[in-house]
Image: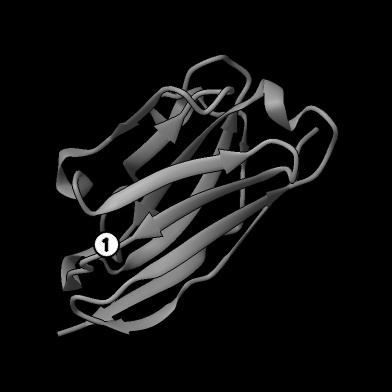
Amino acid sequence: QVQLVESGGGLVQAGGSLRLSCAASGRTFSTYAMGWFRQAPGKEREFVACISTSGRATNGADSIKGRFTISRDNAKNMAYLQMNSLKPEDTAVYYCAARSSLYGSSRTYEYDYWGQGTQVTVSS
């Protein structure tokens, strides 16, 4: 069992930055690939980025490439999403998720555990 708690969301102006954190419980964090997803009002949950168990392999949606960076610290049971050059269309609830696999995935149904989400609002 893994429990995930996101933090770091908030209100920011367009062009600004935020760093989301995901704290994981349990001693097996390093055996889970991690992913970040987001869901805007009235829209489906969409993939943002994922990272392998080792942290060496990452992948991201085209919409965030060059602006967002996913990382993890297995010693601290933490995953992060650094978001730069934020745009109003990045406004959403952001969720971290854990997948019992070496590598992450862009598919929501392939993740085993989810956090409760953190709101990110980007004003124009």
Amino acid type, callout 1: Gly
Instruction: Decide which of 84, 5 is in the foreground and name it.
Output: 84
Q: Residue at x 42, y 33 (%)?
A: 50
User: Which residue is painted at 57% across and 58% down in the image?
Assistant: 21
Snapshot quadrant of residue 13:
bottom left
> In which image quadrant can residue 59 be found?
top left
Closest to the observer, 75 or 88 = 75
Q: Is residue 73 left or right of residue 14?
A: right
Say whether residue 47 is left or right of residue 113.
left
Q: Is residue 43 left or right of residue 99?
A: left
**Is residue 39 toward the left or the right of residue 24 in the image?**
left
Q: Quadrant of residue 41?
A: bottom left
Q: Nearer the viewer, residue 41 or 74?
A: 74
Q: Which residue is mark 1?
A: 42
Secondary structure, mark 1, is: loop
- Looking at the rendered image, the quarter that the N terminus falls into is top right
Residue shown at 44% from the left, 58% from the top: 94
Give the residue at the far top of this rendering: 102
Number of callouts: 1
Q: Is residue 37 above or below residue 7?
A: above
Considering every residue shown, the one lying at the far right of the view is 27
